Image (cartoon, rainbow, N blue to C red):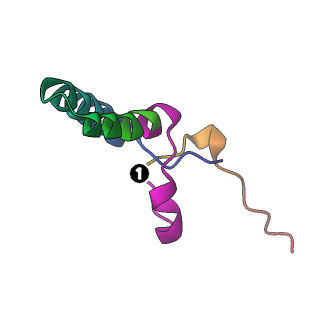
Amino acid sequence: MKKNVGTIDTIIRIVLGIIILLVGWYFNTWWGLIGILPILTGLFGWCPGYLPFKFSTYKRKPEEVQPVDKTE
């Protein structure tokens, strides 16, 4: 499972997730539990919604990039 959620994306997901949880708590509705999803995707750094589109906001560090083998 490769990361596909970057730093800014993570911060936005966690903040929005907390806001959704608090709004659900304030209005006393279970719909606020939906806020758990963006929090989890932000904490794990992986979003299954990005997979079908091959989308990623995660920037690889230089040591994580695989060198290209040009001997073939």
Total count of labels: 1
Report the span colored magenta: 41-57
- Depth check: 43 or 28 in front? 28
42 magenta-colored = yes
The image shows residue 17, relative to residue 66, as above or below, that is: above
Q: Position of residue 49 (x, y in %)?
A: 45, 59
- Tell me if 26 is positioned left or right of 58 in this view: left
Taking the image as drawn, is residue 8 in sight? Answer: no
- Residue at the limit of the structure toward the left, as seen here: 27
The image shows residue 19, relative to residue 41, as above or below, that is: above
The image shows residue 21, relative to residue 67, as above or below, that is: above
- Depth check: 59 or 33 in front? 33
- Tell me if 67 is positioned left or right of 55 in this view: right
Q: Residue at x 32, y 31 (%)?
A: 14
Residue for badge 1: 57
Taking the image as drawn, is residue 27 in sight? Answer: yes
